[in-house]
Image (cartoon, helix red, strand yellow):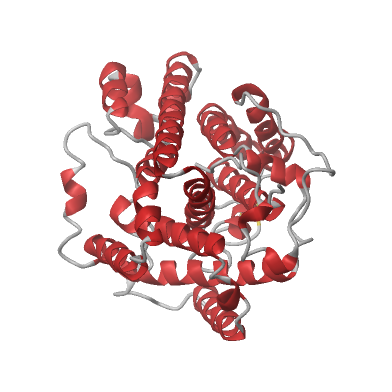
Amino acid sequence: MRRSLQLDFFRGILLILITVDHFLSGNDVIKYFTYEFVGWVTAAEGFVFLSGLTAGIVYTRKMNDKGEAFVNEAVKKRAWLIYKNHTGILLCALVALLFGYGLNEYWINDYGLLSQKPFIAIALSALLLYQPAQMDILPMYMIFILFVPMVIKYLKRGYKWQLVTCSIAIYLLPVIKGLTSLDTITQIGDVNTGFFNLLSWQLLFFLGVFAGFAYCSGKAKQLMQSKVTLVLSLAICLTLFAIKRSHIDLSGFENLFLRDVLGPVRLLNCLALISIIILVCSKKSEWFTFKPICYLGQYSLEVFSFHVVFIVVFKPLNEVLSNIYFYQISNHLFIYPLSSIMLLFIALPALYLAPILLSKKAYRFNRSDIKPAPSEDWLTSASVLTQDYKQMV
């Protein structure tokens, strides 16, 4: 059994982009090309969809091979592992804030409760009611993944359109004006459930699950070879890219592009870009298989968890280095040489320590047992994945 290196590759790429975006200053010229450069799409959207896609593939296969009870147990174990990582990240951040020079002052707006009321913060975090900056991703995935067995079960029974309709209806709740007050219910006192609205972002995740199920069922080949899909997706991406880069005044339409509730235009932009990438991958199986990047994607949970702790500890130092020397190239963009050096030679290489420090299992670059999947089967046969394909967070 072989695994798809392309899935690992894109997970690795997205982890790198997330690290870059979290580490660099907002006006850094590098971030200009990594954050919403191609339109209203960030690494977060791709990460969520790919998470759902991988979950759909992995657990559909397991349900077909080993049954529903096995999948339920496997999902519970995965959710528990994600929960432990979330708690571990918070404890590491607490130690860093308490004993790290200057960290408490730098992060006061993001982690004030953690440093001022650590016991309350830990208790709320254990209940998933305290999710400060960068610590709201894992709880979201944990909640989503618990619903995957039920979704796959009903997909197998033929309720695909009912499930899609239900997911879209839930997505629309926070998007419709007047219902955004739902957010304030979870922002009482010290409660902080994070930036991402789960009602909105679940649609992107479960669209990934639906795609993964179709992949395993052999029903995706025709759509992924469709020239109409390619042309339409290209038209959408190019149009939105042109609108964003031309800086057209979009006053009054902000809700269509919001990130926290995954505005409709942002969702459309993301799905169009994903469609293009999948179409290319289905034709060029030898592309997007660079193994050092695949290595990061194979250990996505460990790498993501490690990157959060790294950001908490080292981003304040990065800000200090940025102020030592910089060069302004436009009204809004700067070059920070010292910051760039730290990113390229410390931050990104440090990600490769995560599997060594946090994983029980080593990833091996063995050409004899890990090969690109044949292009004609990339989206029609689940046999390209190993039985133990590691689930993305």
Q: Does residue 335 appear in the picture of this structure?
A: no
Residue 142 visible in the snapshot: yes
- Left or right: residue 178 versus residue 314 is left
Residue 356 drawn above or below residue 66: above
Q: Quadrant of residue 97?
A: top left
In the image, farthest residue toward the top: 99
Quarter occupied by residue 154: bottom left
* Image position of 68 with respect to 178: above or below: above
Residue 286 screen position, x and y as percent? 79, 61
Expressed as whole percent of the image width and height from the top left, the position of residue 283 reads: 72, 71
Q: With 82 as the anchor, is 328 left or right in this view?
A: right
Q: Position of residue 273 (x, y in %)?
A: 56, 69
Front one among 354 and 384: 384
Find residue 311 and report its image quarter: top right
Q: Is residue 111 left or right of residue 331?
A: left
Q: Is 70 in front, or is 31?
A: 70
